[in-house]
Amino acid sequence: MANTIFRLLRSVLAGCAAAGIATASAAPAQFHHGVILANGVRLHYVEGGQEATGDPILLIPGWPQSEYAWRLVMPKLVAAGHRVVALDLRGMGDSDHPMDGYDSKTMAADIHAFIEASGLARAGRLHVVGHDVGAWMAYAHAADWPGDVKTLTVMEAALPGITPPAPAGIPSDEGNLRSWHFAFNRLPDLPEILIQGHERAYLSWIFAQKSVQRYVFTQDALDEYTRVFSQPGGARAAFSYYRAAFSDTGLEQNRVRAAARLRMPVLAVGGQYSVGAGMFNTMKLVAADVRGLTIPGAGHFVLEESPAEVAQALLDFVGAPLIPSR
């Protein structure tokens, strides 16, 4: 029932935002939806715990999802006393879907502008968390705007230009199931041509192949992810992340960042049956203070497969004493 209410509310809010109608008062008591103009694009977000005393936490979802992916984690963070904001990046969810700007430098600037406009920066103690493609952009933001970030948490991602590439040649069946989309999503135009009219089937297959606890992708969840993916420009924007990240420009942006190690504490999280310790191994290449965690029994979509474990890991990390980096 709660998922249905959130899905219906989000549809109404998206229409209202497009028409320039104020929407915050329509949200459930615990959370509200909003839209902020940041770096020239309208970014949609969900927020809770505005009166909280704990450090604020910014949550960034990954591909092919939206802020809805954080719905099971957010209440636990709010209950622990944090102001929590889940953000749809440009091209994601109910945010604008512009034709360009999907490179990590622009995305990092989007996040910084959102933090400034939302008031999250005023406290100077923001924890930033990203999953999948959201981890790409959370890392880019932490590297480009380190003054915004008290701690960084990245989950279930390989960082373009930083994570060592897989061995050349045809991958195993198991490896192909995990990574085929990195090549497919970068192709010009073809993904949009093939997927148009089949968005739900495409997303259902993705979620089933990359998760262990497949039952978490309920009809309500599939309805919502299909809705945002099927919006005008939605599929094109989703694939644009990959086209930009693996372009010569995108790879060079991360190579430049990797030359200077992150100084804030970093938590790297992987699902047992997905990247596992791979996220930790990647972040050791670019950060001075890295802690690793593998979520038992989880696949790629740890936010929905293991929300209690993810929430507790975040609470333990953001509440831990900070160790000065050498």
Image (cartoon, rainbow, N blue to C red):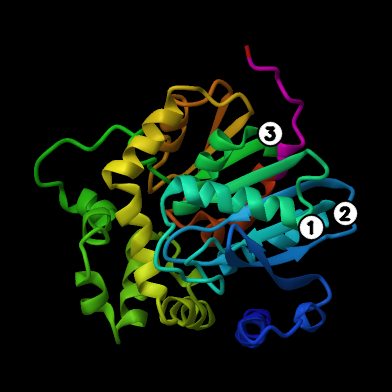
| Residue 271 location (% of width, % of height) | 45, 47
- Residue density around tag 1, few if under 14, some if 14–19, many if 20 or more, within 10 Å: many
Asked whether disc 3 touches disc 2, contact meaning CB atoms under 8 Å apart, the reply is no
Q: Nearer the viewer, residue 188 or 289?
A: 188
Q: Is residue 51 above or below residue 55?
A: below
CA–CA distance in space, label 1 to label 2 = 8 Å
Q: Quadrant of the N terminus?
A: bottom right
Check disc 3 and give the amino acid type. Gly
Which quadrant would the C terminus be assigned to in this image? Answer: top right
Residue highlighted by disc 1: 78
- 63 within the magenta span: no
> Where does the magenta region start and end?
315-325
Of 23 and 18, the residue lying toward us: 18
Q: Residue at x 74, y 64 (%)?
A: 47
Asked whether the residues under the numbered discs 1 and 2 touch, taking CB atoms below 8 Å apart as contact, a structural biologist would say: yes
Q: Of callouts 3 and 1, which one flags the residue occurring earlier in the amino acid sequence?
A: 1
Of the numbered discs 1 and 2, the one sitting upstream in the chain is 2
Q: Nearer the viewer, mark 1 or mark 2?
A: 2
The CA distance from mark 3 to mark 1 is 24 Å
Label 1 residue SS: helix
**61 relative to 243 in the view: left or right:** right
Mark 3 vs mark 2, foreground winner is 3
Residue 239 in sight: yes
Q: Which residue is mark 3?
A: 147
Query: On the image, which quarter does residue 71 sit in?
Result: bottom right
Question: Was residue 319 drawn as part of the magenta stretch in this picture?
Answer: yes
What is the secondary structure assignment of the residue under circle 3?
helix
The residue sitting at 71% across, 73% down in the picture is 33
Q: Is residue 150 above or below residue 263?
A: below
Q: Amino acid at mark 2?
A: Ala
